[in-house]
Amino acid sequence: MQEHIDGFILHLATERGLSVNYQLLVRRFLEAFASWFKMRHQSEKPGEVTTDHIAGFLAQRKKDGIAASSARIELIALKIFFRWLVARKYIPIDPADAILPPRQEKRLPDSLNEDEVRRLIESVDGTAPLDRRDRAILELFYASGVRLSELADARLENLSLEEGWIRVTGKGSKTRLSPVGMAARESLAAWLEFGRPALVKPKTQSHIFISKLGTKLTTARIQQIVKERAAMCGLDPARIHPHLLRHSFATHLLNNGADLRVIQEMLGHADISTTQIYTHVDQARLKEVHRRFHPRA
């Protein structure tokens, strides 16, 4: 089975163009199943795997205490793996086809309110290069809803302050244009004119955000910056992270009347169902308003 797993991961990388992190995640799930199957059934042949075997593995994972969302992801990995084996005629039938994924837990994404966002961003008001950089980072996260990796990889040649757009590369190596609002454009302009030149070194590349050594900021360092700035303005750093600003971006757009399809495009979601979780946020807000203000609520 290990040989087939290696071939499948190569397929994900070369034919599907999926990220290294996703490849590693799928490999971990598949190798965990292969190890369990070998230990329980003394076999390493994928053609001997049955639907009951896969159900038994998932039942064991549930006993181990994994969340339904994690079990769902593991089953998806197994499904696409065995579907690939059938398509390549390595096995005659798909043992995972009949298994339904566990019901997905609906969790409302946390988000900052508009006052909290304003408090976080406007607390960074210094003129030192790092202050200008950190203000621009926070502004861009909230203005565009970009992912952490997208912001870290963003380059000068893909930014147009005049037109108010930035081109980013998201999941599956898909590129999209994300909007850059006026406040973010002003902060970025100040960083690029007065901050970034002071940090540039001979080997500095064209990444928009760089460290004091002139190198590209890592995703870990950007997360740290966001948490540090949150702590400095009195917000709980354990709660604040870049993805929270992405959630806040989407939630505030929806609350102010933006169309869900437009938000989907801005976030770079391939499936509208991924974006629809924000409708639950909006419904929760409407119910709360109704409860507070309706005379017969």
Image: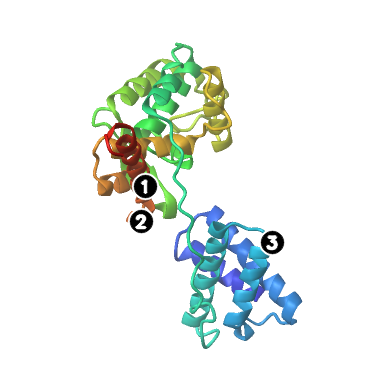
Q: Are the residues at dot 3 and dot 2 in contact (C-beta closer than 8 Å)?
A: no
- Residue furthest top as drawn: 127
Residue 221 visible somewhere in the drawing: yes
Can you give x and y, in whole percent of width and height, for residue 167 in the image?
A: 34, 40
Residue density around tag 2, few if under 14, some if 14–19, many if 20 or more, within 10 Å: few
Residue density around tag 3, few if under 14, some if 14–19, many if 20 or more, within 10 Å: few
Where, quadrant-wise, is the C terminus in this rendering? top left
Q: Quadrant of residue 246?
A: top left
Q: Amino acid at mark 2?
A: Ser
- On screen, residue 38 versus residue 5, left or right, reads right
Can you give x and y, in whole percent of width and height, for residue 116 in the image?
A: 43, 24
- Residue furthest front as drawn: 296
Q: Amino acid at mark 3?
A: Asp
Pointer 2 residue: 273
Q: 64 and 135: which one is in front?
A: 64
Pointer 1 residue: 280
Q: Is residue 244 above or below residue 233?
A: below
Q: Residue at x 36, y 47 (%)?
A: 280
Q: Amino acid at mark 1?
A: His
Q: Residue at x 55, y 27 (%)?
A: 227
Q: Earlier in the sequence, mark 3 or mark 2?
A: 3
Q: Residue at x 34, y 25 (%)?
A: 184
Disc 3 element: loop
Q: Are the residues at dot 2 and dot 1 in contact (C-beta closer than 8 Å)?
A: no
Disc 2 element: helix
Disc 1 element: helix
Pointer 3 residue: 64
Per the model, the C-alpha gap separating discs 2 and 1 is 12 Å
